[in-house]
Amino acid sequence: MHVPVFSSHILPFCYRRKLTSAAYLIVMEQPASMSGSDGVEDLLSKLPSDVLVSILDKLQLRDAVRAGVLSRRWRSLPRQLPRLALHIYDFLPSVDEDDVQVLYFEDEGDDEQEAPPDCPPDTLAQASDTMLQAMGTLLASRASGETPACTLAVGFLLRSNYMSIGRLLDDAMATGKACAIEMDISITYDPTDDDDVTHVITSVLLAYGRRFRTLFDGCPAAFGGLTRLVMENMVLRSRDFHDIFAACTRLETLSLRYCHAVPLGLWQVRHARLAELTVAYCGFFRGIDLAWLPRLERFTCRGWLTRPRMSFGHVPLLTTITLSNRRDVGEPALKLSQILANTAVTDLRLNFRGQDIWVKPEVPKRFKKIFRNLKHIKIRNVHEDCGLSWISFLLQASPWLKELHIKLWDHECSVQRDEDEDCFAAKKTNVPWVVAAGFKHYCLTRVTILGIHDTGEKVVAYIRNLVKAAVNLQEIHMRKNTPCNECGVAGEEFPRTNEERHSLRQRVSGGEPVGFEICIQS
């Protein structure tokens, strides 16, 4: 039997976070004055109830409930919280991060499957049962009509008592105890290197998809009141996504991570209230057509498996677009003018993940309508071998741009390379771009360049050209790269002394007085 050990990145909520908010200190450090046993006047408890509830709402739910036992005045306050947030990982045993070992039966999504006789105690099942009990107690304390309806935000796994959790949410919505539902749904199946990928996708993940469908069909009130849905690691039928949008009429946020659908096809999205859509590392589409989303404000697409067929229909409020991908060797570059057609984005974020540039420089006039409202550009993880001059075409195409943020990538992580030999392309290609003589940008006021490994001529020359073009620049901020999370690599050639920083300022300014601030952070 495979009994995996959960690492900290798999269980991000496994440990209690230390609360540092002023609200926590105020509430948890004054029990004596609240009880009145020492004669000290209790000024805090004299605040209006809505103010005290607002203070408790800033705490984790566990601590907010604890605060309710401090005095009679506080006893009823937790029942008035506008949002109850419970996640299964908050109910795991409290242990040091270095000692955590969460043992559980490896559930492959088969409802007929039973745990082997020698299976150790299922820690996740116990945590899920504890969370279910806590939910029931909290909801039972909120009498319908006497306490305001709350938003129920629940993170759970599609295993053990998932249907009991769903029915509790459904009942809370149907009886008016909850006014909205948020769900964060995931699985625990941990495929090993020896697992057959086809088996995992067609059997295990499809089985979890069927469980989700069972949950969806069995809890109509809960999904009817759903405002936020996060799903990870499952395969659904294509029509399931259509049914989700049809039934979840109040849905405002949808996040899909490592989700797939069968059969593959064009995913056409229509929804009256959806405001934020995130699609990360999903292989369920041959293309995405955001056909009719009148309230969509933020769209994120990360890690597409093939060249995306992406189109935007009626998205009048779309302001923030994030595109992130790793370009493999031989993969053609994309034309932003085609992908972003029919949009008027104000905040554009591109992440190249240390690979070749997958954006093809284009004639700026093609973006005259697309970038007419663009105010912020954030470009992340540009490999230093790809150069920076190509970014100038984005500046030329966005005359109203105010802020430019660039984060460089200066090395190929040896740890990731060992884990995945195909993780990095063998060669990074410089992307040249010739800026028209005399080009000036009149709105750019702030430039940030992070992750600088050294101050070689390539980087300094680009900054100097940028400074010359941005005639109304107010601030340029430069900072060296932080140590890599994987291998610990950190450049040492960035200026560290006052003399070195002064020398860099002189090189950027050409030794002439400038009307903007040059901030260098080592």
Image: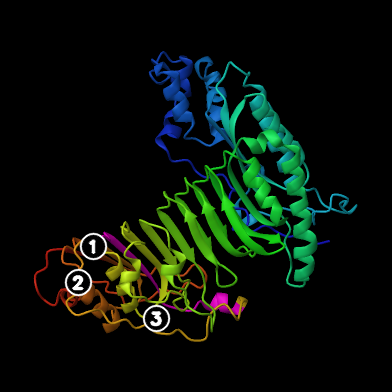
In the drawing, does residue 247 fall left or right of residue 469?
right
Q: Crowding at label 1, few (<14), some or many (≥20) Cα neighbours within 10 Å? A: many
- Report the front residue among 115 and 200: 200
Q: CA distance from mark 3 to mark 2?
A: 21 Å
Q: Is residue 406 covered in magenta?
A: yes
Residue type, numbered disc 2: Ala
Residue 300 percent location from the top left of the image: 50, 58
Q: Quadrant of the C terminus?
A: bottom left
Judged from the image, the secondary structure of the residue bearing numbered disc 1 is loop
Q: Earlier in the sequence, mark 3 or mark 1?
A: 3
In the drawing, does residue 403 fall left or right of residue 14?
left
Residue 208 percent location from the top left of the image: 75, 53
The residue pinned by badge 2 equals 469
Judged from the image, the secondary structure of the residue bearing numbered disc 3 is helix
Q: Crowding at label 2, few (<14), some or many (≥20) Cα neighbours within 10 Å? A: many
Residue 217 percent location from the top left of the image: 75, 41
Q: CA distance from mark 3 to mark 1?
A: 23 Å
The residue pinned by badge 1 equals 444
Labelled pair 2, 1 in contact (Cβ < 8 Å): yes
The residue pinned by badge 3 equals 386
Q: Which residue sits at x=54%, y=46%?
A: 253
The magenta segment is: 400-418
